[in-house]
Amino acid sequence: MIDLIVELKRVGTTELASRMGISLATIRRDLTVLEQAGLVSRTHGGVVARGVGESTTEPLFLEKLRLRQNLKQRIGAAAAETVENGKVVILDSGTTTLAIARALAGRSITVVTADLKVAEAAAAGSTEVHIVGGRVRNGFYSIVGAGAAEAMRGVRADLFFMAADAIDETGVTNSTLDEAEVKRVAIAQAERTMLVADHSKLNTRSFAPVCQLDAVSLFITDHGAEPLLAPYRGKFADIMMV
């Protein structure tokens, strides 16, 4: 349903029910769930996708959410398996780290994040969630700015799971200076930094430098990265493909 709403951007509930082959009552229940999750906005007789960008080079949250979902779920599950109970974990903003949050939710750990959606996903059961303050990037749900960076400096963590907009042999880069700053602080405050990204991020470069590859203790990616990894094997301390 999400894919169809994103594709159409705006659609009536009757048309959506017809395209999906389900009843209007079911459509309305599902749209209520999506609206509560902040993914769509209800209109009179229809629905509009939230966070769908028309003029930005960085895909907004809803667009990112629908890309390579299976890969992100596999990476998220593998990343969660590396976390022992009782640990303090910083989760970066992004849809790959959202998959980690979902896999960790309910476990006896502490999660610190600068992302509204990640915090919401992790906040279940025995999981203690802390969210740093700052400015919310509309359409992305990450929290940035001097306040976010300063709050992150007050944290000591065992692990930082870092997402990336782009990775090449020179290091990890991000689409915005604000997010890159928060990532750099999180790297400094964590004992180990784990980079989580699917193969599409390799051999690309974005605007704002984050770190060199030797700052990463473990790079978790998918098997699609295998033909691209030769130049990186001597630069990352360790690589896990899932």
Image (cartoon, rainbow, N blue to C red):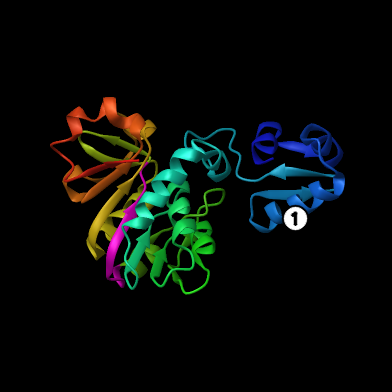
Residue 10 placement, left or right of 73: right
Q: Is residue 120 above or below residue 126?
A: above
In the foreground, 12 or 223: 223
Q: Is residue 230 above or below residue 194?
A: above
Position in image of residue 40 (x %, y %): 69, 48
Tell me the magenta residue range.
153-164
Which residue does the numbered mark 1 point to in the structure image? 32
Was residue 221 drawn as part of the magenta stretch in this picture?
no
Q: Amino acid at mark 1?
A: Thr
SS at mark 1 in the image: helix
Position in image of residue 158 (x %, y %): 26, 66
Asked if residue 130 shows in the view, the reply is yes
Q: Residues within 10 Å of mark 1 (few under 14, many from 20)?
A: some
The furthest residue to the left: 234
Q: Is residue 30 above or below residue 206?
A: below
Position in image of residue 14 (x %, y %): 86, 39
Position in image of residue 8 (x %, y %): 71, 32
Residue 234 placement, left or right of 141: left
Which quarter shows the N terminus? top right
Which quarter shows the C terminus? top left
Name the image quarter holding residue 21: top right
Name the image quarter holding residue 152: bottom left
